[in-house]
Amino acid sequence: MKIPNTLFFRTARTLTLSLLLLSIIILASTAYFVLVPVGKRSADDLAALLVLASQTWAELPPGTRADFEAELLRAHGIKLVEDDYVLEPQLHVNIIVYQRLLLNALQRRLGESHEVTIGSHKNRPDWIWIRIPTVEKFLQFGISAERIGARPPIALLAMAIAVVVLAIGTALIIALRITRPLQVLSSATSAVGKGERKIIVENDGPDEIVTLAHNFNKMSQEVSQLLENRTTLLAGISHDLRTPLTRIRLALELTAGIDSATRNGLERNIEEMEQLLEQALLLARGIDSKEPLKPLDLVRLLSTFAAQIEAEWLLQHPESECQVLFEYSNSIEGSLHIALPEQSLLRVLRNLLENALRYGNNKAVSIELSFQDGYPLISILDRGPGIPVEQQEDVFRPFYRLEDSRNITTGGSGLGLAIVRQLCQSWGWRVSMHTRPGGGNEAHLWLNEHE
């Protein structure tokens, strides 16, 4: 399983490990300096009482021993019996540490030569029984687990569980408080990068976060104002230029004596200038609002689109014999319905396909539909000169042109791929250029479905 590399996970992991290490040190110190000494003292006191009771019982006249046994049970909760029964292994695991401390304390007081055992008696298996030798016989002392009271393993386990829960909970809360404002700012910067304007982040939290949010809001407003000014400027230029272009076109229509070749050349130049103005204005406006989503059948849409673009291209270039082919993976089974913005998708596809037709050396262009990593992948393939690897990202910059194969004489405004990148960023799609095996270029478009 891949470990997340997010700031939240890394912060939570660091805090959790640090708190757990600190907790282990505290628990170990508590056990060594508190629980073990207390357990030793308690075991030593009980061992002294048991040894004194066994010695007192042995010195008493037989007739008074019953009263002594009753008083020992009443006053100290210890039952004394005369029995040679061999004790069974003790099942009280929760006080096993205390049993070891008690056994050591008894052997220190009685000596290693005296055989002392701790175990379970068949008559009261729920009690702790201690078998101590005397001058006459073995005596057995029964003590309830509640009478002993000391349970270091249970205490340590309870403390460990509490510490782990508190450590993890505290780490998650601290990590969330640290990373949540950054996640909000990260989402806001992504929105600005997609072309959304006037993104405002709430100014709350620590002073550093408040300052950061204030600076971001100021930057967002300045960027929005800059984009609005740029759009207004380009809109004004576009409007001012369209008027003389219209006059030139009208004058061209009214002027006689111009041969058809010259007239056609001037008309193409006017059309190219109008197209350049339109695309520049579109790029400047960005994506102000989201168009509605529609459930689209990609197989049908791409098939129809391929035929339409081929017809338009042949109408504009009668001398061309280029074909636009469409293929799709067998796994799609004839249809693929997905919610997408139709007009944005068609504009992206048109720009990519026209780019492939323009620089495809008059050879067939293919549109392929498949799946990759769970997402629909549309590939547009041509057999042109291709794009050098070091420039495959640069071609998405506005007005960027390749020096050799894709120069201005071949046509194009230099804005088509920049508009493609802008639309893809707005909708969360991915677009990239690759070298096609055997020569040519591959444009890959990954689509994400929107709800």
Image: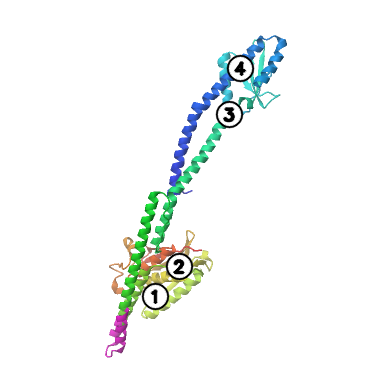
Amino acid type assigned to the residue bearing label 2 in the image: Lys
Do callouts 4 and 1 mark residues in contact (Cβ within 8 Å)? no
| Mark 4 and mark 2: Cα distance apart in space | 86 Å
x then y, percent, for residue 280: 34, 71
**Quick check: can you spot residue 92?**
yes
| Mark 1 and mark 3: Cα distance apart in space | 88 Å
Residues 347 and 384: in front is 347
- Residue at horizontal 31 percent and vertical 74 percent from the top: 237
| Mark 4 and mark 1: Cα distance apart in space | 107 Å
Lower position in the chain sequence, tag 1 or tag 3:
3
Q: Is mark 4 on a helix, strand or loop?
A: helix
Tag 4: Cα neighbours inside 10 Å, few (<14), some, or many (≥20)? some
The label nearer to you, 2 versus 1, is 2
Lower position in the chain sequence, tag 2 or tag 3:
3
Residue underneath mark 1? 322
x then y, percent, for residue 182: 41, 52
Residue underneath mark 2? 290
Is residue 260 found inside the magenta-colored segment of the image? yes
Lower position in the chain sequence, tag 2 or tag 1:
2
Tag 1: Cα neighbours inside 10 Å, few (<14), some, or many (≥20)? some
- Residue at horizontal 34 percent and vertical 76 percent from the top: 275
| Mark 2 and mark 1: Cα distance apart in space | 35 Å
Residue underneath mark 3? 151
Q: Residue 40's quadrant in the figure?
A: top right
Amino acid type assigned to the residue bearing label 3 in the image: Arg
Do callouts 4 and 3 mark residues in contact (Cβ within 8 Å)? no
